[in-house]
Image: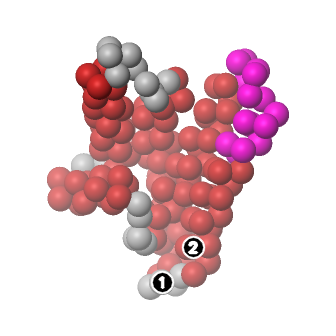
Amino acid sequence: MFKPSLVFAQGACYRAFKLTVGVFRVFFAREKRVLPFYFGTSAAVLSFGVALSVVANVVMNSGEAFVRVLADLSGKNFGNLKIAFDVFCVAAAVVLSILFFDFRIEGTREGTIFAALFTGLFVRVFLRWIRKPVEKRLVG
């Protein structure tokens, strides 16, 4: 059953992610010691939105939808497959960057690697926490 409030919550998570990124860029752009907090907060907020979209079975962006199909077909955990898919995408980006930019890595830095490794982990944790309460609201 479609619940508009859940779709609103998912959209709010994505907007909160964008706001988090904006706030950190404005106030902490030069502070290297807050980068782990910045990466962790951003990944956690984004992951919560992804977890909501997985539980609610709503339209996802292409990366998560592809992983969702793989998880459904293989019966494997969505979070684990998300980590593998994200790491594969980052590795492909690094290889293509080396090939096309004169053996330099362009566009892939510590934030990209952190997101690839930890977004799936956070999604797995959030799915464990929210699946039953959200499904209960969706059904009943």
Q: Which SS class for mark 1?
A: loop
Judge the density around disc 2: few (<14), some (14-19), many (≥20) Cα neighbours within 10 Å: some
- Report the span colored magenta: 20-34
Judge the density around disc 1: few (<14), some (14-19), many (≥20) Cα neighbours within 10 Å: few
* Residue 55 horizontal/vertical position (percent): 44, 65
- The rendered magenta stretch, by its main secondary structure, is classed as helix
Please say if 56 is above or below 23.
Answer: below
Callouts 1 and 2 close, C-beta under 8 Å: no
Residue with the most extreme left position: 74
Residue with the most extreme top position: 103
Residue with the most extreme right position: 27
Q: Residue at x 35, y 58 (%)?
A: 62
Q: Residue at x 31, y 48 (%)?
A: 77
Amino acid type shown at disc 2: Leu
Please name whichever residue, 135 or 70, is drawn nearer the observer in this view of the structure: 70
- The residue labelled by disc 1 is 2
Q: Is residue 49 visible?
A: yes
Give residue 6's mark. 2
Q: Is residue 91 visible?
A: no
Quarter of image, res 26? top right
Amino acid type shown at disc 1: Phe
Please name whichever residue, 15 or 104, is drawn nearer the observer in this view of the structure: 104
Colour treatment of the image: secondary structure
Q: Quadrant of the N terminus?
A: bottom left
* Residue 84 horizontal/vertical position (percent): 30, 37
Q: Which SS class for mark 2?
A: helix
Quarter of image, res 82? top left
Q: Residue at x 40, y 20 (%)?
A: 105
Magenta stretch: residue 21 in it? Answer: yes
Please say if 9 is above or below 67.
Answer: below
